[in-house]
Structure formats: structure tokens, C-alpha cells
């Protein structure tokens, strides 16, 4: 069993622009997000989990307890209601926005790192971000 806790560097994307378009991200921010190469840090302290996404422009951090609802503030001012659970070795976050659209983000552990699989429920669009383990 491999622990998902660690630091990861972004390597590549799959269908990311189409996914962000379906979610409603405007053109310029969408292109910037697709071109970014973030560092991902996942940590766990007792029952508190933290996911940090670090780019040259900003650092986003969420801290949560598995199974409990929490808010995530997105760059455009949108507030998501999230619940994160552990499915096997993977973290799965279900997010509901103010328009009641649901997005599922699965942090899937692999032998080399993490694949972030994002699914927009309404459109069915799936975007993936591949990260290589640093530590």
C-alpha cells in the first residue's frame, strides 16, 4: 500500500481545456490554468488533511476532515461545498457549486505519482492532470 501523502510535480494534462470549458472557466484564465505546471502537496496530521496547489501566481490550500463538509474558495470568487473521502488509497472530493453542478476530483495514486481525475457530472467531461512524486 502506497501512501498518497507527499509532494508531486505536474507533468502533463489530458482533455483539461475541454473540462475547464465545460465547468465554465472563462477563456483567458482557462488557458493560463492549462499552461500552469503546479506543485501538489498532500499532507495528513491525525484526522486533518491538507492539499496545497502551488503555482507561480498563487498557492491554494484546503484543510479538511474526511467525510465532513467544508468550503473551498475558488479564484473567481466561487465557493464550493466539498466532502472528501478515502476510497482505497485515493482521495475523492465531491464538490457542489452555487449552480448545483457537481464535480468529482479523484486523487488517484500510481506507482510514479498521482493522477488528478476531474469529472464534471452535467457534461460528462473528464480532465486529467498527471503528477510525478517528488517525496
Image: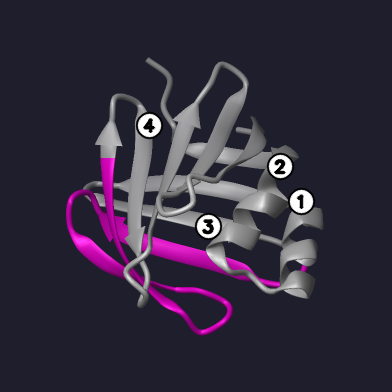
Residue 63 drawn at (x, y percent): 36, 62
Q: Which residues are magenta?
A: 56-85
Badge 4 marks a residue whose secondary structure is: strand
Q: Single out the residue that lies furthest toward the left.
A: 68
Q: Mark 1 or 2 closer to N-term?
A: 2
Disc 1 to disc 2, how far (Cα)? 5 Å
Mark 3 near mark 4, Cβ–Cβ under 8 Å? no
Q: Single out the residue that lies furthest toward the front.
A: 123
- Please tell me which residue is depicted at 81% across the width and 55% down the height of the picture: 35
Magenta-drawn stretch, dominant element (helix, strand or loop): strand
Q: Mark 2 or 3 closer to N-term?
A: 2
Q: Is residue 100 left or right of residue 122?
A: left
- Please tell me which residue is depicted at 28% across the width and 31% down the height of the picture: 87
Q: Mark 3 or 1 closer to N-term?
A: 1
User: Which residue lies under the disc numbered 4?
Assistant: 90
Disc number for residue 37: 1
Disc 4 to disc 2, how far (Cα)? 18 Å
User: Which residue lies under the disc numbered 3?
Assistant: 52
Dot 1 alpha-carbon crowd within 10 angstroms: few under 14, some 14 to 19, many 20 or more: some
User: Which residue lies under the disc numbered 2?
Assistant: 10
Quadrant of the snapshot with the C terminus: top right
Mark 1 near mark 2, Cβ–Cβ under 8 Å? yes
Closer to the camera in the image, 66 or 34: 34
Badge 1 marks a residue whose secondary structure is: loop
Residue 84 drawn at (x, y percent): 29, 50
Amino acid at each position: 500500500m502506497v501512501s498518497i501523502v507527499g509532494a508531486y510535480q505536474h507533468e502533463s494534462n489530458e482533455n483539461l481545456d475541454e473540462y475547464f470549458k465545460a465547468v465554465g472557466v472563462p477563456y483567458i484564465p482557462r488557458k493560463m490554468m492549462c499552461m500552469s505546471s503546479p506543485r501538489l502537496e498532500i499532507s495528513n496530521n491525525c484526522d486533518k488533511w491538507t492539499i496545497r496547489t502551488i503555482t507561480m501566481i498563487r498557492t491554494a490550500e484546503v484543510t479538511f476532515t474526511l467525510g465532513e463538509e467544508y468550503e473551498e474558495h475558488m479564484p473567481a470568487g466561487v465557493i464550493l461545498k466539498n466532502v472528501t473521502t478515502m476510497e482505497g488509497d485515493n482521495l475523492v472530493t465531491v464538490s457542489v457549486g452555487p449552480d448545483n453542478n457537481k464535480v468529482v476530483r479523484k486523487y488517484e495514486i500510481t506507482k510514479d505519482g498521482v493522477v488528478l481525475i476531474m469529472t464534471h457530472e452535467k457534461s460528462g467531461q473528464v480532465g486529467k492532470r498527471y503528477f510525478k512524486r517528488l517525496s
